[in-house]
Amino acid sequence: MNLQELITPVGKFVEWTFETVLVPLSNPFNLGVILLGLAGIGLWLLKQRKYSEEARQNGGII
């Protein structure tokens, strides 16, 4: 028994994990991150509009 006989099954398992678990999960995860970012930007813009209008009414913005 040599080292190659021990390392090859580990390498095959890692390759199988990438092909069957990580690759199918990558597209929905990326889409989720993008949608979460867009929702965060939208929420921030709505709050910023409210804060700017409040500052205009109080004389904070000329």
Image: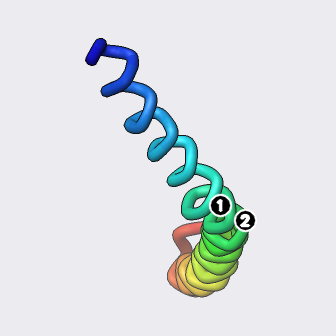
Which amino acid is tagged 2?
Asn
* Residue at the image point whose x is 68% and y is 66% from the top: 24
Instruction: For label 1, count other residues whose C-alpha is less than 10 Å away and answer few (under 14), some (14-19) or many (20+).
Output: few
* Residue at the image point whose x is 51% and y is 40% from the top: 12
Q: For numbered disc 2, what is the local secondary structure?
A: helix
- Residue denoted by label 2: 27
Q: Nearer the viewer, residue 50 or 11?
A: 11
* Residue at the image point whose x is 61% and y is 75% from the top: 36
Query: Do labels 2 and 1 touch, CB within 8 Å?
Result: yes
Which amino acid is tagged 1?
Ser
The image position of residue 58, as x and y in percent, is 51, 82
Mark number for residue 26?
1
Asked if residue 50 is positioned above or below residue 23 in the image, the reply reads: below
The image position of residue 46, as x and y in percent, is 65, 84
Q: Residue furthest top?
A: 2
Which quadrant of the figure has residue 25? bottom right
Disc 2 to disc 1, how far (Cα)? 4 Å
The image position of residue 44, as x and y in percent, is 59, 75
Asked if residue 23 is positioned above or below residue 33 in the image, the reply reads: above
Q: For numbered disc 1, what is the local secondary structure?
A: helix
